[in-house]
């Protein structure tokens, strides 16, 4: 009987790509990949350490894994394992602690544990691995690491400097994923906009998008988070030049106050971010723009925060990811004495979340009546209903059959549906 492995993920889309790589290693070692609801022999927690909450989530998953699977081997890996080795002492539930500095360690461990089934002679595709993890979208990692030195961010300390994957390797993985049925390829990384910079290449991300469009024929392409200064004219031209590139960009802002941005060591002013956001909105039809915002950064005064609120009222951003500031050991800002009180952070987060809700609702209302290309991700067989993600990153629910999950389907939206939209199929043919 083949042994089983469960992979649990905390964090960003780059972590989802890493988890797919772990699933591929497990299959190659002779394991079956199963969900956390099923009996399993190994639980691997691929952790994140970008915030205190992410740390807590990693610890909670490890403890739950031990409770739910008392006989299983529990492994902690990812950024949390790399950045917090001292936490081993407080987590006896974990049998193996593997940082990301040794990329072959997970595979070696799984081979030592020994899947009792026959190892796969060939590695499975990224799409097949994502399906094993319950994802319909396929996450293609194009680079790792970061060359920025933001005062609050621990990621460069645990991930290292920018390292781009070879273009031919990415193209090969994309083609294999599409051949296996992938209908959306998410280009992701720790700092995806730096793709090619370590090789001295300029606008390499735009070139990669064009190459992938040329070397694939059906799957749409989505970009994950892109820093403001890396949204170049060449990249916008590449996105606008093909309907297969999703009209959606997530551009981290962090603050709309120049004084706070300067303290954060962010390499732009608020006005420059606004110029970029307006250019994106003018160039890409029906684009949805998202942004990260940190509430309560050390030294952020009430006036500084109000400046961010006023900025968000005018800039064409359609949703926010809001984070209360949390000090990360080893970062510059963790040593500063002027942290904002927890109560004030909570109040600021609440105000930003209200702004987020208003912006999301306004964008949704403007999308009613549009025809959107939707990747069917979840099936509700009892209701003969599907839900999925549009190219501009909206959740859309419509009538359909479970066999169509994973396909791109044209849907005319008809009404609001909670934080998403409901619609009707524009035609009976998949895209």
Image (cartoon, rainbow, N blue to C red):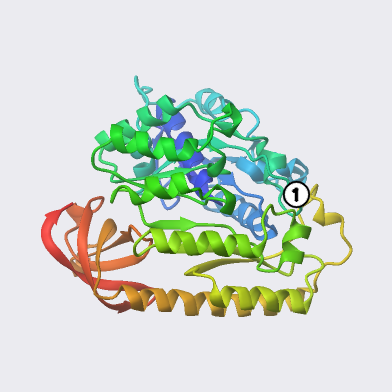
| Residue 187 in which image quadrant | top left
Q: Which residue is label 1 attached to?
A: 90
Q: Is residue 343 visible?
A: no
Residue, far left? 428
Q: State the residue lying farthest toward the right.
A: 337
Q: Estimate the x, y position of residue 128 in percent, counting from the top left.
A: 33, 37
Image: 62 above or below 357: above
Relative horizontal placement of residue 235, taking residue 72 as reference (left or right): left
Residue 146 at x, y percent in the picture: 64, 40
Q: Is residue 153 left or right of residue 20?
A: right
- Name the residue located 73 percent from the left edge and 70 percent from the top edge: 296
User: Above or below — where is 235 with respect to 314?
Assistant: above
* 321 with respect to 1 (left or right): right
Q: Residue 47: x and y, percent?
A: 60, 47
Q: Is residue 55 above or below residue 202?
A: below
* Quadrant of the image occupied by residue 257: bottom right
């Amino acid at each position: 009987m083949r042994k089983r492995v469960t992979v649990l993920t905390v964090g960003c889309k780059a972590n989802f790509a890493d988890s797919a790589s772990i699933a591929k290693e497990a299959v190659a070692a002779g394991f079956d990949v199963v969900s956390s609801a099923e009996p399993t022999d190994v639980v691997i927690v691929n952790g994140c350490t970008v915030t205190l909450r992410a740390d807590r989530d990693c610890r909670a998953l490890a403890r739950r894994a031990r409770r739910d699977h008392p006989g299983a081997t529990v492994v902690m890996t990812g950024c949390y394992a790399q950045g917090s080795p001292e936490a081993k002492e407080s987590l006896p539930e974990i049998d193996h602690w593997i940082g990301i500095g040794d990329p072959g360690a997970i595979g070696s461990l799984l081979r030592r544990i020994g899947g009792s089934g026959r190892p796969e002679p060939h590695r499975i595709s990224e799409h097949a691995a994502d399906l094993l993890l319950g994802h319909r979208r396929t996450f293609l990692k194009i680079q790792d690491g970061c060359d920025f030195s933001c005062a609050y961010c621990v990621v460069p300390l645990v991930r290292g400097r920018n390292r781009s994957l070879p273009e031919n390797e990415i193209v090969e993985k994309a083609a294999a994923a599409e051949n296996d049925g992938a209908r959306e390829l998410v280009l992701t990384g720790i700092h995806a906009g730096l793709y090619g910079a370590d090789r001295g290449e300029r606008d390499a991300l735009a070139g990669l998008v064009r190459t992938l469009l040329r070397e694939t024929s059906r799957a749409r392409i989505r970009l994950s988070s892109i820093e403001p200064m890396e949204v170049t004219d060449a990249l916008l031209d590449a996105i606008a030049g093909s309907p297969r590139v999703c009209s959606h960009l997530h551009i981290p802002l962090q603050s709309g106050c120049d004084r706070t941005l300067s303290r954060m060591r962010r390499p732009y002013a608020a006005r420059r971010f606004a110029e970029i956001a307006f250019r994106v909105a003018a160039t890409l039809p029906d684009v949805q723009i998202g942004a990260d915002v940190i509430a309560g950064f050390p030294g952020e005064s009430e006036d500084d925060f109000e400046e961010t609120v006023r900025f968000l009222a005018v800039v064409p951003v359609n949703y926010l990811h809001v984070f209360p500031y949390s000090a990360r050991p080893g970062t510059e800002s963790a040593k500063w004495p002027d942290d904002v009180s927890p109560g004030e952070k909570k109040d600021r987060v609440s105000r930003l979340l209200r702004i987020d809700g208003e912006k999301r609702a306004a964008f949704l209302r403007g999308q009613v009546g549009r025809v959107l290309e939707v990747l069917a991700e979840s099936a509700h067989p009892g209701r003969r209903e599907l839900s999925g993600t549009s190219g501009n990153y909206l959740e859309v629910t419509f009538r359909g059959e479970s066999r169509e999950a994973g396909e791109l389907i044209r849907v005319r939206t008809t009404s609001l549906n909670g934080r998403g939209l409901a619609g009707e199929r524009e035609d009976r043919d998949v895209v």
